[in-house]
């Protein structure tokens, strides 16, 4: 009992210390450690807006910023280390940090139960499947549920939507908002939407939205990219450009992983599928696989495979996840978004 009490007391102490660090530390704090305003402005222009992002960025990439020498980067790294601990912590301290994770409902109870209550912040959730399986409809529903109070399975925040295929529809947001009793105009006001036209533009928008997350501290809870791979398949074609495509995709996914952890937001990505000719040789029932290869697989925290069922039913299967078992759950697409199968 004495040991249990010590653990509880230590947990309470850690929670009190962490209370002030619920969100990130702005790079303006670097001024107190000898970094001038001009250099801080250059960091912001490069999409580096927090101390944690400085630590996440390699020295090589920092040296690429105009006017940054190796000596200046070394000084910058030392200043960041004083403001934020990026070294080892105990498992107990890590468990306290994980308490900041929020879970956002997909709109369907069975689907929520499948993935542990909903999609998590500080993580990337990828949904892949054929057309008409509900990938975009889940995205629209999440944009509304992210605005709900935490007690209702929401994130009590705003959402950002990067549209690469021209699929965002304000009419869907309005009908889903009506389902939850939210003013439709207010729901749309709380969603940032940007249309990406090529893979480079897509990365620029990700950098821009990260700056917006830093500017509005703790306000955003969801980032949707629908879809992550479409523009890469257009910009890079053939095996000759495959290596470059995967490298660019890896850089983008790395940035998204950092954004998810840095700003405590849930990142929801939709992905396309392609036929797998080799699957027929191994008698696989469904010879389809997600586009993006191992790079997509390693970057995504939870991967969901969506497919069509009987009639209007859709099936979601956990393809990969660190904390939920492989299983399936049915759901349907209704006027009010994603719902349980009746």
Image (spheres, rainbow, N blue to C red):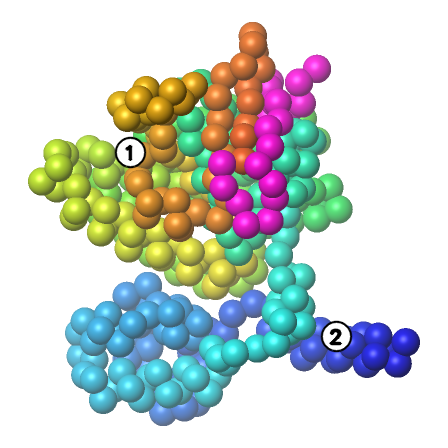
Figure check: 212 above or below 285: below
Q: Are marks 2 and 1 in contact (CB under 8 Å)?
A: no
Q: Residue furthest right?
A: 1
* Image mark count: 2
Residue nearest the viewer, comparing 336 with 128: 128
In this picture, residue 181 sits left or right of residue 244: right
Crowdedness near tag 1: few (<14), some (14–19) or many (≥20) residues, C-alpha within 10 Å: some
The span shown in magenta is: 319-342
What residue is at 17 percent from the left and 41 percent from the top? 242
Crowdedness near tag 2: few (<14), some (14–19) or many (≥20) residues, C-alpha within 10 Å: some
Q: Secondary structure at mark 1?
A: helix
Residue nearest the viewer, comparing 82 with 30: 82
What residue is at 36 percent from the left and 91 percent from the top? 34
Q: Residue furthest top?
A: 311
Labelled disc at residue 11: 2
Residue 193, by quadrant, is: top left
Residue 294 on the magenta segment: no
What residue is at 16 percent from the left and 48 percent from the top? 244
Labelled disc at residue 230: 1
The quadrant the N terminus occupies is bottom right
The quadrant the C terminus occupies is top right
Tag 1 or tag 2, which sits nearer the N-term? Answer: 2
């Amino acid at each position: 009992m004495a040991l249990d009490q010590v653990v509880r007391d230590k947990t309470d102490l850690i929670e009190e210390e962490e209370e002030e660090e619920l969100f990130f530390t702005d790079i303006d704090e670097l001024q107190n450690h000898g970094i001038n305003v001009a250099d801080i402005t250059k960091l912001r222009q490069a999409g580096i807006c927090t101390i944690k992002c400085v630590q996440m960025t390699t020295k090589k990439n920092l040296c690429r910023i105009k006017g940054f020498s190796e000596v200046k980067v070394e000084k910058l790294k030392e200043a960041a280390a004083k403001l934020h601990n990026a070294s080892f912590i105990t498992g107990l301290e890590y468990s306290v940090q994980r308490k900041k994770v929020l879970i956002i409902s997909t709109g369907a109870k069975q689907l929520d139960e499948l993935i542990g209550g909903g999609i998590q912040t500080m993580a990337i959730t990828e949904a892949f499947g054929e057309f008409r399986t509900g990938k975009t409809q889940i995205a629209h529903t999440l944009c509304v549920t992210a605005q709900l109070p935490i007690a209702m399975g929401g994130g009590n925040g705003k959402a950002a939507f990067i549209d690469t295929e021209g699929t965002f529809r304000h009419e869907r947001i309005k009908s889903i908002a009506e389902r939850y009793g939210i003013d439709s105009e207010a729901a749309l006001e709380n969603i940032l939407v940007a249309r990406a036209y090529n893979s480079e533009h897509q990365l620029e928008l990700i950098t821009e939205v990260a700056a917006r997350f830093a500017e509005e501290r703790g306000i955003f809870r969801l980032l949707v990219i629908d879809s992550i791979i479409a523009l890469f398949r257009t910009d890079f074609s053939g095996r000759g450009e495959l290596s470059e495509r995967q490298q660019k995709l890896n850089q983008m996914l790395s940035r998204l992983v950092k954004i998810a952890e840095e700003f405590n937001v849930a990142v929801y990505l939709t992905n396309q599928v392609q036929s797998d000719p080799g699957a027929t040789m191994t008698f696989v029932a469904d010879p389809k696989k997600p586009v993006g290869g191992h790079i997509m697989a390693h970057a995504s925290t939870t991967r969901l495979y969506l497919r069509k069922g009987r009639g209007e039913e859709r099936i979601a299967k956990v393809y990969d996840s660190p904390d939920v078992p492989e299983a399936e759950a049915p759901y349907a697409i209704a006027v009010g978004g994603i719902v349980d199968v009746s």
